[in-house]
Image (cartoon, rainbow, N blue to C red):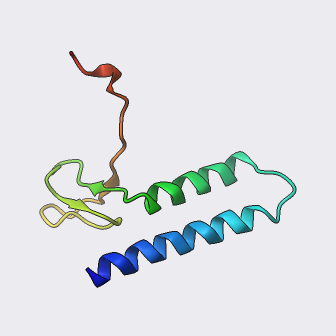
């Protein structure tokens, strides 16, 4: 539980640094928006998963415990592709 709180605090701290560093520029560029979006996703409790083993999940980037592949950020796709 302590580790989860520490990870949440670290993600929030990184998000605030990215947000504040962007406020010192004259304008927000596409690159700044991408960094803010990534930090927001991480702070929101993103899930990283193995492309070959979807049952392997982590709250941070790393390696799959089964095959050693890099874990990738799981994207929440719109439900428009689902069959009703």
The residue at the point 36 percent across, 34 percent down is: 77
Relative image position of residue 16 (x, y in whole percent):
61, 69
7 to the left or right of 2: right
42 to the left or right of 57: right
* Marker count (numbered): 0
The residue nearer to you, when weighing 65 against 80, is 80
Which quadrant would the N terminus be assigned to in this image? bottom left
3 to the left or right of 22: left
Relative image position of residue 42 (x, y in whole percent):
44, 60
The residue at the point 33 percent across, 48 percent down is: 74
Relative image position of residue 66 (x, y in whole percent):
12, 63
Which quadrant would the C terminus be assigned to in this image? top left
Q: Residue furthest bottom?
A: 2
Relative image position of residue 17 (x, y in whole percent):
64, 71
The residue at the point 35 percent across, 65 percent down is: 61
The residue at the point 55 percent across, 71 percent down is: 14
Q: Quadrant location of residue 5?
A: bottom left
Q: Residue furthest right?
A: 26
46 to the left or right of 29: left
Q: Quadrant location of residue 57?
A: bottom left
């Amino acid at each position: 539980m302590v580790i989860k709180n520490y990870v949440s605090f670290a993600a929030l701290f990184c998000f605030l640094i990215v947000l504040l560093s962007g406020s010192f520029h004259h304008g927000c560029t596409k690159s700044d928006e991408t960094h803010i979006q990534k930090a927001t996703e991480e702070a929101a409790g993103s899930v990283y998963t193995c492309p070959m083993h979807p049952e392997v999940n982590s709250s941070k980037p790393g390696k799959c415990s089964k095959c050693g592949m890099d874990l990738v950020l799981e994207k929440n796709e719109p439900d428009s592709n689902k069959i009703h």
